[in-house]
Amino acid sequence: MVLRLNADKPGKTLRRELMSKAFAVGGMKIASIALSFIISLLLARQLQPEGYGSYVFVVSLVTLIALPVNAGIPRLLVREVAKYQVDDRWNLMRGLLRRGHQVTMLLSVLILFVIIILCSVKASWNIDDQWTLLLLAVPLIPLMALRNLRSSVLQGLRKVVQGQMPEMVVQPSVFLAGISFLLAIGMLSPAWTIVARVGASFVSFGVGTWLLLKMLPVEVHEATPEYEDKPWLRALVPFTLLAGVSILSSETIIVLLGIFADIKDVGLYRVASSGALFVSLPLMIVNSVISPYVSRLYHEGDMKRLQVMATKSARVVLVCALPFSLLFVFQGDRVLDLLFGKEYLAAHAALVILTVGHIVNAAMGSVGLLLTMTGHERQTLNGLLMALGVTVVFSAALIPLYGTVGAAIASTLSLITWNVYLYKQVYEQLRIKSAAWVSISRAS
């Protein structure tokens, strides 16, 4: 990722820093995608569409249930930690970290109590029962929430590689080792797969805790915590809504498929959506790297370099996304047959439709990130609400008729709606044009 922000020394320094972190995070992200793909391939083949669909459905359901736990705290942490580091406000940073953990643990305990009681009453204790699988998966709620907190703090401190490592490398590596062991001893099932996922999340959480303690500035450890509860709460409300609506948008389709279609369609759709995510992989890498820098440049008032960063990163994203797009559109059926088997050829049409949405997402640039990292969460929330409305309406209308294809159409329309609206908002609020095709000299 080459970002020539300008010819002066600070620009070159920032460019080198971004490039080095982009390559490091990019390498980890590629490794993560490869590991996740191997996991999906292994589970899809061994559990078959129905068993794989049951596992995916339960994990998506847990993700939705966990919405209130992390709320918008991770996004708030990235932005505020980056700002406090610039201003050397270590007391406030320590206070924010403490408050974030307090809120997360309180909400985790409350939700765990409710879900455990409900599952204990409803579960039939059969290995194929959805309530039993859900009970096995509930430890993921606090583990994922606390891991996200640690990752967000490290990203805010510009320790992007360390912040991403537990989720990108540690968790999928341990998970793959776990399911490989289960397969070797003949015990691979949806239930044991969930147990392996919980174990991998616990290990990932432990590594994240160690990295945070190691990388946190000494000044934070020595500082007396100070609190700005009211400003944090005001900022947290839109961040919480953003996080909630974002997860709803991504997971609602899976849940609606499980309700209105066959559980087998859930497995087919997950395979298609996992493939299409390769198109958005470059954007995910770029967003992971530039998020603290967007906050920093905006806080310093350097809009010129922010514009250059936004445009050039979008161009790199689009160029890197095109090969996957062409492969899935023209050879997607062969890819599915070769990797997953003929049972998953029915996911080809959904893969092509989802690819269209993801290439639009890549071409429009880091629209959501630019808004949330510069204090314009409400505009991002409005876009997410519009996208969620499109998702729900078209999913409810199309899934009962067309199954995975209907779900893919709803997802693609939602993604395009989100990008078009937020692109307009980025220009109106920041006077920045984020798309790949924009001429930098004319952007302002």
Image (spheres, rainbow, N blue to C red):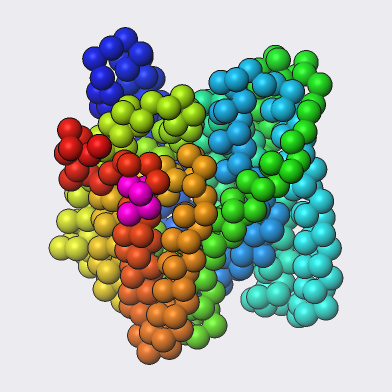
Q: Is residue 163 left or right of residue 68?
A: left
- Where residue 331 appears, x then y in whole percent? 18, 62
In the displayed orientation, state which residue is furthest to the bottom. Answer: 401
**Can residue 127 be seen at all in this image of the molecule?**
yes
Nearest the viewer among 400 and 92 is 92
The quarter of the displayed image where residue 14 is located: top left
The image quadrant where one finds the N terminus is top left
Give the vertical position of 346 relative to 39 (above or below). below
The quarter of the displayed image where residue 113 is located: bottom right
Query: Residue 427 colored magenta?
Result: yes
Nearest the viewer among 340 and 373 is 373
Q: Residue at x 32, y 21 (%)?
A: 15
Instruction: Name the magenta segment's main secondary structure.
Output: helix
Nearest the viewer among 431 and 306 is 431
- Where residue 272 appears, x then y in whole percent? 35, 65
* Span of residues in magenta: 424-428
The quarter of the displayed image where residue 309 is located: top left
Q: Is residue 166 left or right of residue 421?
A: right
Q: Residue at x 30, y 15 (%)?
A: 12
Query: Residue 262 colored magenta?
Result: no
Q: Is residue 395 left or right of residue 86?
A: left
Q: Residue at x 66, y 75 (%)?
A: 130
- Where residue 308 appears, x then y in whole percent? 28, 31
Give the vertical position of 302 relative to 246 (above or below). above
Q: Is residue 415 left or right of residue 92?
A: left
**Can residue 56 be seen at all in this image of the molecule?**
no
Nearest the viewer among 385 and 396 is 385
Q: Residue at x 37, y 38 (%)?
A: 286
